[in-house]
Image (cartoon, rainbow, N blue to C red):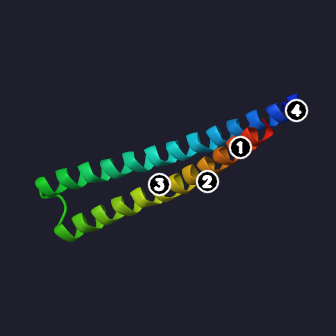
Amino acid sequence: MPISAAKKQLIYLELERAHFNASNAVAVFNRATIMYFILLVFAIFGIANRYITKPMLNALITLGMLILLTGAIPYFKNISQETKTINKLIKTVKSKK
């Protein structure tokens, strides 16, 4: 039994939504990664030129790791969810054929 045009359109829209959500998750992860490396470079230059102390260096590294985790956890969560959604759509389409 072929898939109706409305069902095809619905599947297409769900795929577009999944792509949009994945793109947003990647953007958030990229920003978190950039902030992490900026803090890391700042910490390296600060400790090399003796502008910051060792406790301050530890705080910067901890803050950088927290920022990286804050960006990575939603990213992996979102990608996992969208993968499940796409796999469900694939099963739906295959079962209709």
As measured in the structure, the alpha-carbon distance from the residue carrying label 3 to the one carrying label 1 is 27 Å
Measuring from the top left, give residue 66's x and y in whole percent. 40, 63
On residue 81, the disc is 2
Measuring from the top left, give residue 29's x and y in whole percent. 46, 48
As measured in the structure, the alpha-carbon distance from the residue carrying label 3 to the one carrying label 4 is 37 Å
On residue 64, the disc is none
Q: Earlier in the sequence, mark 4 or mark 1?
A: 4
Q: Is residue 6 left or right of residue 30?
A: right
Q: Amino acid at mark 3?
A: Gly
Q: How packed is label 4: few (under 14 Cα within 10 Å), some, or many (20 or more)? A: few
Q: Quadrant of residue 10?
A: top right
Most extreme residue toward the bottom, as rendered? 55
As measured in the structure, the alpha-carbon distance from the residue carrying label 3 to the one carrying label 2 is 16 Å
On residue 6, the disc is 4
Nearer to the camera, 55 or 71: 71
The quarter in which the C terminus is drawn is: top right
